[in-house]
């Protein structure tokens, strides 16, 4: 199980890296006015989302479930911290899909959000990461 835990952490780090970088690309993309720059950001966003973020998310979920399911009845069924962690992970998955929606709007040149919006949007995965790590390590309840 230590190998599965290691793979879960590796996948999570890759997923979080992508979710921290993608909104930063949205910040710069929303400020870009030249067509070549817009096309470059569209390519970067698409590749980051489909080739790194989504596979890393799926692997994080697969390895996480692999760790969770066998121990659910024994260790996690009544662990409040695990329920909170899973809630934050579900919110992170929702954020992942929000990124896709923003990316699709950028791809159609239909983005209406400002760089200031994306600067705040970029903070969401950081907050969720902090909460998830605290739940997993500190186990406050």
Image (tube, helix red, strand yellow):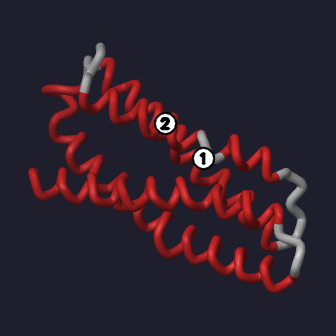
**Front in this rendered view, residue 80 or 121:** 121
Residue sitting at x 28%, y 32%: 136
Residue sitting at x 16%, y 41%: 70
State the image quarter where residue 44 is shown: bottom right
Quadrant that contains the C terminus: top left
Residue corresponding to mark 1: 95
Residue 70: mark in rendering: none
Nearest to viewer (mark 1 / mark 2)? 2
Mark 2, Cα crowd under 10 Å, few <14 / some 14-19 / many 20+, is some
Work out whether 91 lies above or below 15.
above
Residue 128: mark in rendering: 2
Q: Say which element carries label 1.
A: helix
Q: Is residue 135 left or right of residue 41?
A: left
State the image quarter where residue 43 is shown: bottom right
Residue sitting at x 55%, y 71%: 48
**Front in this rendered view, residue 28 or 8:** 28
Q: Is residue 83 left or right of residue 79?
A: right
Work out whether 120 lies above or below 9.
above
Q: Do the residues labelled 1 and 2 touch (CB within 8 Å)?
A: yes
Mark 1, Cα crowd under 10 Å, few <14 / some 14-19 / many 20+, is some
State the image quarter where residue 42 is shown: bottom right
Q: How far from the left and from the top, in percent, is residue 49?
A: 57, 68
First in sequence: mark 1 vs mark 2: 1
């Amino acid at each position: 199980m230590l190998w599965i835990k290691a793979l879960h952490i590796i996948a999570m780090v890759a997923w979080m890296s992508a979710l921290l970088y993608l909104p930063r690309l949205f910040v710069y993309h929303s400020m870009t006015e030249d067509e070549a720059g817009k096309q470059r950001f569209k390519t970067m966003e698409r590749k980051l989302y489909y080739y790194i973020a989504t596979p890393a998310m799926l692997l994080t979920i697969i390895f996480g479930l692999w760790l969770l399911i066998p121990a659910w009845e024994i260790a996690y069924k009544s662990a409040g911290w695990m329920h909170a962690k899973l809630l934050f992970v579900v919110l992170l998955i929702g954020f992942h899909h929000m990124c896709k929606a923003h990316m699709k709007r950028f791809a159609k040149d239909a983005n209406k959000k400002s760089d200031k919006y994306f600067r705040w949007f970029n903070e969401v995965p950081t907050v969720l990461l902090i909460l998830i790590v605290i739940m997993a390590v500190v186990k406050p309840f």
